[in-house]
Amino acid sequence: MSKLFSEILAEDRRLGILRTLQACADYESNESILAAALDQIGHRVSRDSIRVELAWLKEQGLLTLEVIADIHIAKLTQRGLETACGIITTPGVKRPGPQ
């Protein structure tokens, strides 16, 4: 069964978030930086959409989430790093292509 286009976009956004965190110092960034990074790869989404994706990634154990003064700060977990690198596959996250 083929995936819906919305599912394909969500999987790609999630991978984009994980790969952005992978590139950040301490594997950590705030929602504003993540939104700008997603915009650079063709995903112009609202701040609410970023928060939904961050909550989903947290539920999967791919990142931790801290809220300070209503700013969401995400930090990659080991599982999230392994997903971003393609070492493991996580359903709902696009698998990266070969480097």
Image (cartoon, rainbow, N blue to C red):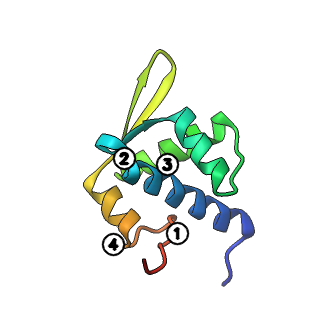
Where is residue 19? Give x, y as percent.
Answer: 45, 57
Residue type indicated by callout 1: Lys
Going from N to C along the chain, the mark reached first, 2 or 1, is 2
- What's the CA distance linking mark 2 and mark 4? 15 Å
Residue type for callout 3: Trp
Lateral position of residue 30 relative to residue 63, left or right: right
Q: CA distance from mark 1 to mark 3?
A: 14 Å
Check disc 2 and report the residue beneath it.
63
Where disc 1 sits, the SS reads loop
Residue furthest toward the bottom? 1
Give the percent coordinates (x, y) of residue 20. Answer: 46, 51
Q: Is mark 2 in CB contact (under 8 Å) with mark 4? A: no
Label 2 sits on a secondary structure element that is: strand
Give the residue displayed 42% in from the left and 77% down from the top. Answer: 99
Q: Quadrant of residue 1?
A: bottom right
Q: Would you name the residue on which mark 1 appears?
A: 94
Numbered disc 4: secondary structure: loop
Q: Nearer the viewer, mark 1 or mark 3?
A: 1
**Is residue 77 in view from this perspective?**
yes
Looking at numbered disc 4 in the image, what kind of residue is underneath it?
A: Ile
**Are the two marked residues, 2 and 1, in contact with CB atoms closer than 8 angstroms?**
no
Farthest-out residue, left: 78
The residue under label 4 is: 88
Q: Residue flagged by tag 2: what amino acid is it?
A: Leu
From this view, report whether residue 55 is shown above or below residue 67.
below
Q: Which residue is mark 3?
A: 56
